[in-house]
Amino acid sequence: MEPLFIEAGEFTPEISFDSNSNIFEISGVSRPENVMGFYQPAFSWLQEYENEVLGEGLDYKYRVNSLKLIIKLSYFNSASSKAILQILDLIRKFHLKGVNVEIDFYYDEGDEQMREDGEDLSEAIEIPFNYIMIVE
Amino acid sequence: MIKKEIILSHNGDLNFETIGILLSKLKKEMDSRGISVTLYKKVLTVMIESLENIYKYDDLINENYFPKFTIERQDNQFILTAGNPVDKKSIKMLKEKIDCVNKLDKQELRKLYRKTITDGRFSKKGGAGLGFIEMAKISGNKIQYRFEDINKNTSYYILEVKISN
């Protein structure tokens, strides 16, 4: 599968999903003018990835052992929360099927709000996150 | 008399790009004053949510009443004030949303936030009041608001959020 790469914009994040390394990263800032429109390619790609990984005829465990999602956002508006949650939902499916899923959630040192938002997302999706503080 | 300093001020229509420019201005102003990351991020978040609310609810083009946004600093507190004309039909819903979040403490607000993002039931304009939940959660104070009569169908809606360290 082709990796997904969306370059960062002034108010939109970089999205880098690599089906070779199984590392999926969303970084930068997120306040797209049309949130669902912006994230739609990411949803579609993950859906396609899931179809391949959990495709018929092959035990999925031989395709993907583990995957990692990295969320490294300096800020995101509340409308983006819903989109991020949708991505987490798609990732969660792998977790439920026994794939080892790791989620790294970054926050700037001092940004308690971001840390709490991470905790809220983690609780909403019922998967523990690794919280990583970025020190300037 | 306690000194009040105007950090940022905007009068006039708001579009997506204008919001971007104001956010850059905020960063510059905060950096030049050596404001902590903690406080900056709180103000930034509330600013984004209140500006995007204006942008969402500003469905009236009124020649005499424009959106307005200011950030003032008084001691260690930042006061964000946002105003825009709204259709009177929106008043009830806005009041309900704000009154609701004003009643809740921080833990309850976090619970409501989690519930709202998972529920998926958005209002027609999207957002499901997530913005208000965030504002109340970050502020820790009640969101102040009022509606000033303009004409039969329109009111001027003013929102004020206070943020301290």
Image: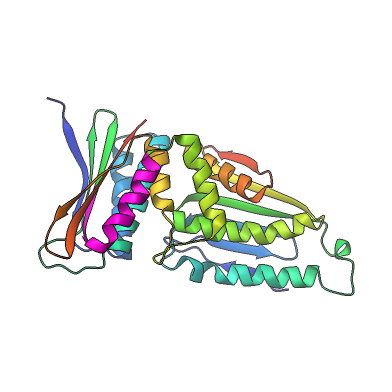
Question: Left or right of A29: which side holds B70?
Answer: left
Residue B131 position in % (x across, y down): 40, 51
Residue drawn at (76%, 59%) of the image: A94
The magenta stretch spans residue A71: no
Q: Nearer the viewer, residue B33 or B64?
A: B64
Q: Position of residue B24 (x, y in %)?
A: 32, 52
Task: Look at the image and tell me in which quarter the C terminus of chain B lies.
Answer: top left
Q: Is residue B84 magenta?
A: yes
Determine the image quadrant of residue A10: bottom left
Is A45 situated left or right of B148 in this image? right
Is most of the magenta stretch helix, strand or loop? helix
Q: How many discs mark residues in the rendered view?
A: 0
Compared to residue A37, the image places residue B148 above or below, namely above
Q: Is residue B124 visible?
A: yes
In-image side of B8 versus A135 (left or right)? left
**Residue at the image point whose x is 37% and y is 50% from the top:** B97
Look at the picture and state if A29 lies above or below B31: below
- Give the magenta range: B82-102
